[in-house]
Amino acid sequence: MNTLDDPAAVPSFESFVLANGAELVAFARRLTMDHHRAEDIVQDVLARIGLSWSRMATVDDVRAYVFKAILNDFLSWRRRLSSAERPTADLTNLRTGFTTGVDETVLQRDELLEALALLSPVQRAVLVLRYYHDQPDARIAALLGCREGTVRSHARRALTTLRSSQPDRTSEGTRR
């Protein structure tokens, strides 16, 4: 049912944020790989949307609209700051002394985050939407404003980058 036919179908802003806030932050965190930046992006988007919440009755899917706004804000945020931020240290050498008692799952998560950091924002967004949110290529293309073939190219290049960045492992699963 279109929300134009039923204005009561659009929840209040407060109830929308309470119902979806944690999922919105989790989505942004997967994109940014930084909880604080994710919260900032979600907060900025919700602040802008909250000012015009009365017009949300014209939107067919409010939740999808907010997810798209977060994705757009992430991509524009990365473009603005991509040339200003530079990593200052390589911490991979420091980790080797702590691997003795650390759970393998934590190490795998850290390796995945390091590998995801190598991807462009668009490639990371494609993988997050495809593998975390189970979105089809057509939906991802609509969200990113590109063709399905471009989405598949981004995914292929991202997966190639991730595969090439995997550390060599022995048959026991430990690093060489």
Image (cartoon, helix red, strand yellow):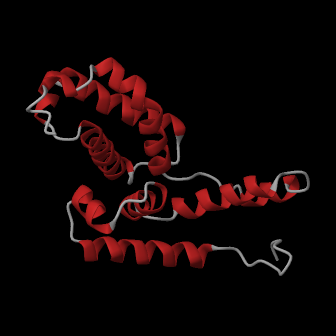
State whether residue 96 is above or below residue 47: below
Could you tell me which residue is drawn at 38 percent across and 36 percent down?
41
Q: In which quarter of the image is residue 61?
A: top left
**Residue 89: x, y in percent?**
64, 53
Could you tell me which residue is drawn at 49 percent across and 43 percent down?
29
State whether residue 60 is above or below residue 85: above
State whether residue 49 is above or below residue 71: above
In the image, taking residue 89 as reference, residue 38 lies left or right, namely left
Kindly tell me whether residue 90 is visible in this rendering.
Answer: no
In the image, taking residue 2 as reference, residue 70 lies left or right, namely right
Could you tell me which residue is drawn at 15 percent across and 37 percent down?
59
In the image, taking residue 136 as reference, residue 49 lies left or right, namely left
**Residue 18: x, y in percent?**
41, 23
Q: Quadrant of residue 140?
A: bottom left
Quadrant of the image containing the C terminus:
bottom right
Quadrant of the image containing the N terminus:
top left
**Residue 10: x, y in percent?**
22, 27
**Residue 143: x, y in percent?**
25, 55
State whether residue 144 is above or below residue 70: below
